[in-house]
Amino acid sequence: MQLSFLFLFHSPNASFPLSLRHLPPLALRGFSPSISRATAAAASPWPPRARSLYRFAKAAKSEMSLLDRERPQTVMEYLGKGGASVGDDLAILLVHIQYACKRIASLVASPFRSDLGRLAANGGVGLSSSGRDAPKPLDIVANDIILSSLRSSAKVAVMASEEDESPVWLTDDGEFVVVIDPLDGSRNIDVSIPTGTIFGIYNRLLELDHLPVEEKAQLNSLQSGTRLVAAGYAMYSSATILCLSFGSGTHAFTLDNLTGDFVLTHPSMRIPPRGQIYSVNDARYFDWPDGLRQYIDTIRQGKGQVPKKYSARYICSLVADFHLTLIYGGIVMNPRDHLRLVYEVNPLSFLVEHAGGRGSDGKTRILSIQPVQLHQRLPLFLGSLDDMHELESYENIQLKVNPGYDNNRVCQQNFCACDTGELQYFGSAIYACPWISHMIFSVVYAE
C-alpha cells in the first residue's frame, strides 16, 4: 500500500491528496508536532515538490474562502440575492442597460472619438424644432447603442431619448418605458471632462393600449416622476460608475476593468444633510435674480444658517456635478430653464430623494411636476435637505429671463401649441395647454 502511494506521487500525471485522512501512517509522521520539521521532511513519503504544492493549495483554499466572503457584490448578484426587490424582467432590462453603458464608456475613452466628433465640425451646435439640443456624432452613436440594447432586451415598449424628436415604440410585448439622455455632457469629451448617461424606468400604462402608436408612446413617456420604478446614471470618468435606485435607497457600482463587472462600492448612499459646496455657473451671477444672488453671497461669507463658508465646485457636466454633490453634500443647480424634466431632472431627483436629499425647481418638488412635453426644460436645484430648505426660503431664485442665450430656446420651452393652434404659456410645467392636460390627467391618471 505504501509502495503504491509513493509510486503515485512520483508519477507525473498523479494528483496528491489535500486531506490527512487520505495519507498512510508513514506519511502522518511528517505532521506530528512531537518531531522536528527536518525529521518529518526526511520521514515523509512526499517528495519536496508535492509538499510545497500541498501547502500552496491549502493556503490558496483559505485565501479564496476569505475573498469569497469579503468580495463586493456585482450588480447582478445584488439584484439576484435580495439586495433589491426587483422582478426578473426588470433585472433583465438592467443587464442590457449596464452592457450599453460599458460600450459607451469604451467609446468615450477611445482615442478615435475626436475623429468622430470632427465629422460634424461644420454643423455647429444648435436647437432642433422641438427645442432639444441638436445631436452631435457621439450622441447619435450612444443613442444607437442604447436603442440596440433596449430592443434586444425585449422588455421595453417605449424609449424616449434626448436624441429623438419623439418617443420610439419598440415592441407591443414590452412592459417598461425608458426615458434617457444617452450621453450627457458630450461637448466636454475632447477635454476629457466626465460625461454620463442618465435614465429613468417606468411601467408601461396598459390603459393606453387602445390609442394609436404615436399617441400612446408620447403619453407613456410623459409620466410624472412619482411613477418611476427605477432610475440611474452612469458616469464615465477616471472610473466608470453606475448609480441606481429602485425606490429603496441609492447604490453605486464601479466597473472592474479586469472582470468587466460593476461591483457594489457605495451601498445605501446617504447625501449629508448639509454640505459646504455649491455647483453653479458663477459667470452668470449678474444675470441671476436678487434672491439667488443673496443666497450665494450669504453662504460664501459664512453668514447663512450655519457659520461656515461655502466653496464653488463647478464641472459643467450635470452627471459629474451631481455625483460630487451626492458624495459630499451641498447643492447643484441651474437656475434657468435649461435642463430637461423627463430624462434628466426626474431621474436625478429620484436618486437624490432616495439618498435623503431633495430636488426642486426652486418652488416645487421636481417629482410632483407633470411633464407636458418630451423635451420640456425647467430650472433645477438638487442637493442636501438642509441646504435645499435654506435655499428655498429665499424668494425669486428662478431665472426666467435668459440674457445672452438663444431666445428661441426660451420660446420653445415656455409655449406649446394645442389642437386649436393657439400658444399657451406654461413656464416651468405648472400650467399646460387644455388639450395636453386633459389627455394626461383624464386618460393616463384616471383612477
Image (cartoon, grey):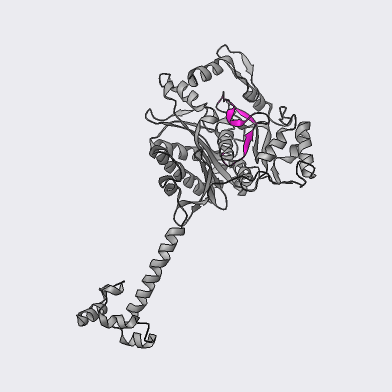
Residue 355 belongs to the span the image colors magenta = yes
Across and down, in percent, residue 190 comes to 60, 47
Residue 19 position by quadrant: bottom left
Q: Is residue 46 left or right of residue 108?
A: left
348 or 79: which is nearer to us?
Answer: 79
347 or 367: which is nearer to us?
Answer: 367
User: Could one spot residue 16 in this view of the protein?
Assistant: no
Q: Magenta part of the protein: which range?
A: 354-378
Across and down, in percent, residue 290 comes to 78, 32
In percent of the image, x 37 and y 77: which residue is there? 52
Across and down, in percent, residue 241 comes to 53, 48
Q: Main secondary structure of the magenta part?
A: loop
In percent of the image, x 68 and y 40: which residue is there? 386
Say if 265 sits above or below 410 in the image.
Answer: below
Across and down, in percent, residue 414 comes to 64, 23
User: Could one spot residue 212 in this view of the protein?
Assistant: yes
Say if 318 sits above or below 434 in the image.
Answer: below
Question: Outermost residue toward the front?
Answer: 34
